[in-house]
Amino acid sequence: MLHKSGFVNIIGLPNVGKSTLMNSIVEKKLSIITNKPQTTRHRIFGIVNRSNFQIIFSDTPGIIHPYYPMQKIMMQYVRKSLQDADIILFTTEIGKLEYFSMFDNINNNIPMIILINKIDKISIKKEEDLLYDTINYWHKLFPHSEILPISALKKINIDLLMHKIITLLSEHPPYYPKEFLSNKSERFFVNEIIREKIFFIYKQEIPYSVEIQTELFKEQKTFIYIFSSIYVEKNSQKGILIGKKGLTIKKLKFFSVKSMESFFRKKIKLKFHVKICFNWRYDFKKLKHFGY
C-alpha cells in the first residue's frame, strides 16, 4: 500500500489559533491555549497516524519582534520551521494584516497553504468584507499559495485541509513509530499544563516570568506522583505565586491536577516547590538549562 509521510509546520502571528488548530487535528490537547500572546514557547510536534499516512504537525511560537534572549530563541524555532517543512500552514485570522521580515526566509520550493482562521465569528456584512480584504492582502504577498478560510475551533473546513495536505505529501515510510503522538515527554506536558493554569490564574507579568521543571514523574499502577519546581525571577513574584496563606498556589495545584488527570487518564499526586532564578529569560545559559 502507498504510504505518505511529511512534516507540516504551522506558523503565524500570536493568538491566531495555531495551537487550537493542531489540537483540533490531532484530537488531543498537546499545546496549551490562552488568550494571551506568547503562550507557546517551544516547537511541539503532534503526530497523526493512519494506515496509509503519517503527518507530523509542528506548532510554533507566534511571530513577534524579539526583545530579549528567550524571545530570540523562540523566533529561531520559527525560522527553522520555515526551512525544514514539507508543507507550511501559514495561519492568520480575519483582519490580521501584518508583514514580518521573517517571511522573506520562506523557502519558495515548499508548498504553503494560507489559513484564514476564526471564520465562525463572521456574522455581519462588514466582517465578510474584512474577510475578503484579508484574503486579498495575503494573496498579493503570496500569489502562488492557496488560501483557505477555516475555523479551528468549530472544525470548519478542517477535513478539506487534511485532504489538501495528504494530496501534497510525498510517498515516504513513517518517520516515527505509529503509536507516537508527539516528540515531547510526559514531563514536558506536565510543565505546560501547570504553565497554562498560571496564565489563567495570575495577572500581569507573572505568567511570562515563570518557568516549570518537573523533577519527578513516577507512574504507579493507579496513580502518577509528580514533583515540579516553579521558577520565578524575583522574590516579590514568589510571594504573589504562593498567595496569602498559600491559597493561590493551592488553587493552581487543584486546576493543574484536574487537567493532568484528564490528559494522562490516571489519578495525580502533585507537589510544588517555588524557587527563584533571577532574570532567567535574559540569560542564555539559564535558558539552555531550561531546555531552550
Image: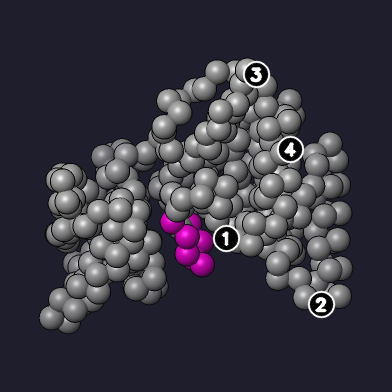
Q: Is residue 93 left or right of residue 234?
A: right
Verify CB contact (< 8 Å) between mark 2 and mark 4.
Answer: no
Q: Nearer the viewer, mark 3 or mark 2?
A: 3
Dot 1 surroundings within 10 Å: few (below 14), some, or many (20 or more)?
A: many
Residue drawn 68% across and 32% down?
166
Query: How far is the residue under mark 3 from the one under mark 2?
Result: 45 Å
Looking at the rendered structure, the kind of residue marked 4 is Lys
Mark 2 and mark 1 lie on one chain; the one further toward the N terminus is 1
User: Any mark on residue 164, and which?
Assistant: 4
From which residue to which does the magenta span run? 31-38
Q: Which residue is mark 2?
A: 124
Relative to residue 122, is residue 88 depicted above or below?
A: above
Instruction: Provide residue 234's location: percent of width, then percent of height.
Output: 23, 64
User: Can you tell which quarter of the image residue 193 is in?
Assistant: bottom left
Describe the element under mark 3 as helix, strand or loop: loop
Question: In the rendered structure, which disc, 3 or 2, sits on the residue that comes first in sequence?
Answer: 3
Read off the residue under disc 1: 15
